Structure formats: C-alpha cells, structure tokens
Image (spheres, rainbow, N blue to C red):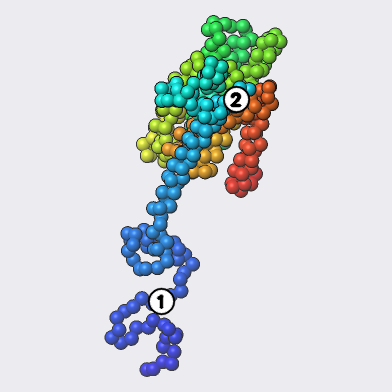
Amino acid sequence: MTSSARLPPGGGGIGVGDEPAEPEEPEPLDAPRAADAALVKRPIGAGPTGRRPAAAVPRPAARAVPRSRAAVLTVALAVALLAAAVLAAGVGAYHLSPGDVLSSAAHRLRLGGDGLGRVGESVLWNVRLPRVVLALLVGASLGCAGALMQGVFGNPLAEPGVIGISMGAAVGAVAAIALGIDVFGNWTVSAFAFVSGLATVLLVYALSRSGGRTEVVTLILTGIAVNAFAGALIGLFIFFADNAQVTQITFWQLGSLSQATWPKVLAVLPCAAVGLAVAPLYARKLDLLALGERPARHLGVDVERLRIALVLVVALLTAAAVAVAGVITFVGLLVPHLLRMAAGPGHRFLIPGSALGGALVLVVADLAARTVAEPAELPLGVLTALVGSPFFFWLLRRTRRRQGGWA
C-alpha cells in the first residue's frame, strides 16, 4: 500500500535497508539543562562539536579570575599603604618631602641616604612615625577583626562592637579616669580598657552559651544587652566625674592618635602581631562555615571551637586597638564589606586584605584629621563616623534591594 503522506518534507524517515538514525526534533525548552547534563557525563572536549561544549571550555579560566583579582588588589593595597604612610610621615606643620622621609629611613637602616638634621630627625622619628605606625597597627587590627566577625556571624554587616568589645573597653577606661586610678602611671587607662574589653567578651560568651552550644542570634542579642548595660555604666561614671575628668573621658571616647608614642606602639604590637598572624589560619574553616553550620560540621569543622577561637582573636585585636586609640567605628564594618564586593567572599584574601585596607583607611583618616582643620585636630573617631555612617546606610539599602526590598 502506498501512502501520499509518508513523512513530512525533510523528515528523517527510515527506508528499507537504511541504518536507523535518530530523528531530528525541535529543541525542547529545557535544552540548556540537557546540554549541561551531557557535558557533565563527558570529559571536556568530547562529544559533538557545537556552541555549548565550546562555551563550556573557558570555565577553569573563570575560576582563576577571582584569584588574579585578589592578587592585584593585594599588591594595590600594599603599594597604596606604603605611599600613604610616607606621605603622612611628611605632612604637617614641619613639612618633609617623601624623598626626605625615605632618605632618613635609609640612613637609619644604614642603606645610604642622609639625615635631616636635629629638628627634622626629631619631628620624623619622635612625632610622625610613631603616629603612622600606630595607625597602621590599629587600622589593621580593626579591619581584620571586622572580617572575622562577619565570617563568624555570616553577616556582611557585622562588626566587632556587636559583641560589646568596644563598649566594654570604654567602661574600663572611663572607670580609670573617673575614679582617679593611677596604678600603672600613663598606662593605667590603656591597661584598664584592654582588660575590660576582654572581660566583656568572655561575659557575653558565657551568658549566651546554653547546652554546650552558642547560637549566633543569642550571641548578638546578648551583646546588645551588654552594650546597653556598659553605656549605662559609662553614664554613671561621667555623672560622678569632675569637669576635667569629663573632658578627658569625652576626648578618649571620640578616638584619637594624638598621644602616639613608641612605647604605645610596642604595647599594641604583640597583641596585633599575634592576632594578625593567627587569623589567616582559619580562612578555610570560615569558607566552610559560610555554607552553614550543619554542612560545616559534616565537612569536619568543629563550629563551636572555631567560634570560641575567633571570638578570642577578635577580642584581642579590638581591645588592644581601643585601649590605645579610643573608640573608632566603621573601619571594621566597611573595609571587609568593600573588599568582599570587589574580590568575592573567599577568606584567604579577605582576612589579610582587610588588614591592609583597614591600615590604609586609618592612616589616610588620621592624616585628614590633623590637616583638615589645621592647626586644630579633628577627633579620629568622629571623622570615621561622619564618613562611615552615610556609607553604611548606602550598603544597607543596597543589601536590602538585592534581597527583594524592605521587610
């Protein structure tokens, strides 16, 4: 029997004696997923030659982009930090050119160069450089602590003050000033601030621990409550202080590096060095923790031990910074967030990058604080808050917009 409509034109019918062939069909709607599934089954380069396998070849190169970007950012931050430090060491009432600064440094290191004379050498090495180095250490400590806090809490808007470190350190310093305590001489305020900051963190952690575990939400709420209590204690101490003590307390709370000396640099250096050296060791575990607590546990991470260790490192870095510089806000919040936007959430770059970025921000901010209103000097904490607050609000709106708007 013959049929007038055997197959549509161009149809892939099977004739007598022909080898079976797969009929050509229109591409289904889920063809991309089918192509991807086929690519998974075959090694790269195998299979039919088409646009999809060719497009899949550059995938390994796409993974390398964040690494190269992180390397470029690291080099850029290091170069910018060096340039800012040299510039900050020379700018002031007694001007020194960058060449003078480098020449004096080379002369001190016995690498050639010439000295600057008695006045120039004294200004550079006894006034400017202690302040620049202290800004480097404090900024690096705050930036690194912010990156660790955001990793622990899984929230890019977290910062060290969330668990009461800054306010706890302020309680110790204000108490030492208001009560007239002078046990350690010029180091009394810094020592009390450091010990009080560490004690506050331990208190927050002990209060938020239940059943051998510590939930992130409980830790944050406990930190908020302790911050409120610390604020009440500070207000109580200010109420009983005299006018001179109130002035000293206010100046300390505003944050400043104007009292920088080499002994203060040496005081904060061990804490900053230990914290900055230990923090990168937890980068891989923080990356796993970003997947969630349960997946991290399945991958071998002791989440509770990790959280304890990192909270202690954050406390060490922040308490040391606050003890010598007062309360300086927004450095630990903004720097890690900006670097995460630029190079992704990987902590292998984020932790050291935040240290470099925090140091750069604080060196530049301190330079602006002492030159914008010359001969007066703006409080460093006020300047960082003035710049950081609007930027934080922008980040908040940007985050909410990406998550679908305000709740």
Which mark, residue 48?
Answer: none
Q: Where in the figure is residue 186, as x and y percent of width and height?
A: 55, 9
Determine the secondary structure under disc 2: loop
Q: Is residue 32 left or right of residue 230?
A: left
Residue 159 or 216: which is nearer the viewer?
A: 159
Numbered-mark total: 2
Quarter of the image where the N terminus is located: bottom left
**Kind of residue sitting beneath label 1:** Glu
At 63% from the left and 29% from the top, the residue drawn is 368
- Disc 2: CA contacts within 10 A as few (<14), some (14-19) or many (>=20): few
For the C terminus, the image quarter is: top right
Name the outermost residue toward the bottom: 1
- Residue under the point 57% across and 25% down: 96
Observer able to see residue 57? yes
Place of residue 406 in the rendered image (x, y in percent of width and height, measured from the top left): 65, 44
Depth check, mark 1 against mark 2: the one in front is 2
Which residue sits at x=62%, y=46%? Answer: 401
Q: Disc 2 marks which residue? A: 95
Residue 380 drawn at (x, y percent): 62, 25
Residue 31, compared with residue 90, is above or below; it is: below
Disc marking residue 24: 1
Give the residue displayed 39% in from the left and 32% down from the top. 281
